[in-house]
Amino acid sequence: MKITVVGAGAVGATTADNIIRRELAEELVLLDIKEGVSEGKSLDMYQTAALLGFNTKPVGSTNDYEKTKGSDVVVITSGIPRKPGMTREELIGINAGIVKSVTENILKYSPKAIIIVVSNPMDTMTYLAFKEADIPKKRIIGMGGALDSARFKTYLAMAMDVSPSDIHGMVIGGHGDTTMIPLTRLATYNGIPVSRFLSAEKLEQIAADTMIGGATLTKLIGTSAWYAPGAAAAMMVESIVRNQKRIVPCGVYLNGEYGQKDICMGVPVVLGRNGWEKIINLRLSDAEKAAYEKSAEAVRAMNGALTF
Ligand SMILES: NC(=O)c1ccc[n+]([C@@H]2O[C@H](COP(=O)([O-])OP(=O)(O)OC[C@H]3O[C@@H](n4cnc5c(N)ncnc54)[C@H](O)[C@@H]3O)[C@@H](O)[C@H]2O)c1
Ligand SMILES: O=C(O)C[C@H](O)C(=O)O
């Protein structure tokens, strides 16, 4: 198994670190355009192998795609992050060009790769990669819902003073401050509805906090987050390479599912060795359906800004 992470910045390096520590491949290639950075970070990470005891080898590459040849899974994190006060959508001007060229270069050397798109605005970047790649839709997957769901579960766990790993819940829809849909109605504490433990007002607050989870961290840090994003991307890679068939909300190309066509947006999918293998069709309430429709309108408007 060979995995490539494009972009050796905060999210890319954290994703790579999570992947090698969990030995998800024999080789992990980290590629960036900045001279020497991916080589330096790879060497630094490899020096943790003697301390932590893993055998995956990280290899750095300054924009040399030959080194990525034959990758099974590629995670695209290249692109600029937002600064406090910005929306993810404002990144489209620069990131669209980056994601387009990276997708082309990756597929030249790894035509069979499963591609996970992280760069923002993620739903639109996933759609762009899908249109550019011209590969089966099951091999293009946007990372957003995995992270948003982790934030949702964490906020619920904090409010209930319980372990986040005992909380189950999903966030679907777009990966934007106003387009996310935390599915509070379906969230549970080990199978028990969270509404048994928290008031309706508290649950509404948690859903609102989840939606602006990325903006909150950007304000605190001065740039966007990377620990949970890197862990979320690595969790998706793990479900794919180990064929775990985990259900994860991911940005995928919809062709009628959830009432949407020709758009990439967050829905729960089964992640396995072939990419996203199946969309799970949730029975949404009328309010949730309306929220999904509204979210799709916003994502579609953003896609309209793309020039192919
Ligand atoms: N989908 C999500 O949930 C999620 C979560 C966090 C961050 N992000 C997004 O991920 C992206 C990266 O965030 P970050 O914090 O790692 O930023 P960063 O600035 O730390 O790293 C980005 C890296 O991309 C590299 N890069 C730029 N153009 C490139 C190219 N053509 N080829 C290869 N590498 C290139 C840069 O040199 C830099 O090292 C941003 O767009 C951010 O908004 C998405
Ligand atoms: O908030 C951002 O801009 C980065 C990312 O999408 C996140 O949710 O952390």
Image (cartoon, rainbow, N blue to C red):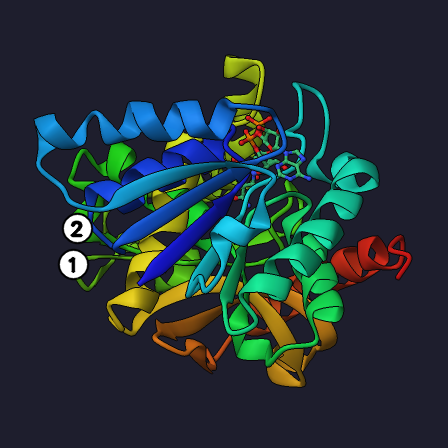
Q: Which residue occupies the extreme bottom position in the image? A: 256
Residue displayed at 50% across by 23% down:
37
Under circle 2, the secondary element is helix
Secondary element type, mark 1: loop
Between 245 and 185, the one lying in front of the other is: 245
Determine whether the beta carbon of the residue marked 2 sits less than 8 angstroms from the nearest atom of ligand 2. no
Mark 2 surroundings within 10 Å by alpha-carbon count, few (fewer than 14), some (14 through 19), many (20 or more): few
Where is residue 152 drawn, in percent x and y?
Answer: 39, 44
Q: Which residue is mark 1?
A: 190
- Check disc 1 and give the amino acid type: Asn
Task: Work out which quarter of the rendered image holds the C terminus and state it.
Answer: bottom right
Ligand 1, seen in the image, is in the quarter at top right
- Residue ID for mark 2: 166
Tell me if 294 is positioned left or right of 72 in this view.
Answer: right
Q: CA distance from mark 2 to mark 1?
A: 5 Å
Residue placed at 16% from the left, 32% from the top? 49
Q: Quadrant of residue 39?
A: top left
Three-letter amino acid code at the position of disc 2:
Asp
- Residue 56 vertical placement versus 262 (above, below): above
Q: Position of residue 210 (x, y in %)?
A: 48, 40
Q: Nearer the viewer, residue 57 or 290?
A: 57
Residue 127 in picture, x, y percent from top left: 71, 63
- Image side of residue 229 versus residue 128, left or right: left
What label sits on residue 304 in the rendered view?
Answer: none
At 70% across and 76% down in the image, what residue appears? 134
| Residue nearest the observer in this picture, 104 or 272 | 104
Please determine whether, in this image, residue 50 is positioned above or below residue 211: above
First of labels 2, 1 by sequence position = 2
Evaluate whether residue 16 shows in this view: yes
Callout 2–callout 1 Cβ contact below 8 Å? yes
Residue 90: x %, y % from top left: 79, 35
Q: Is residue 297 left or right of residue 74?
A: right
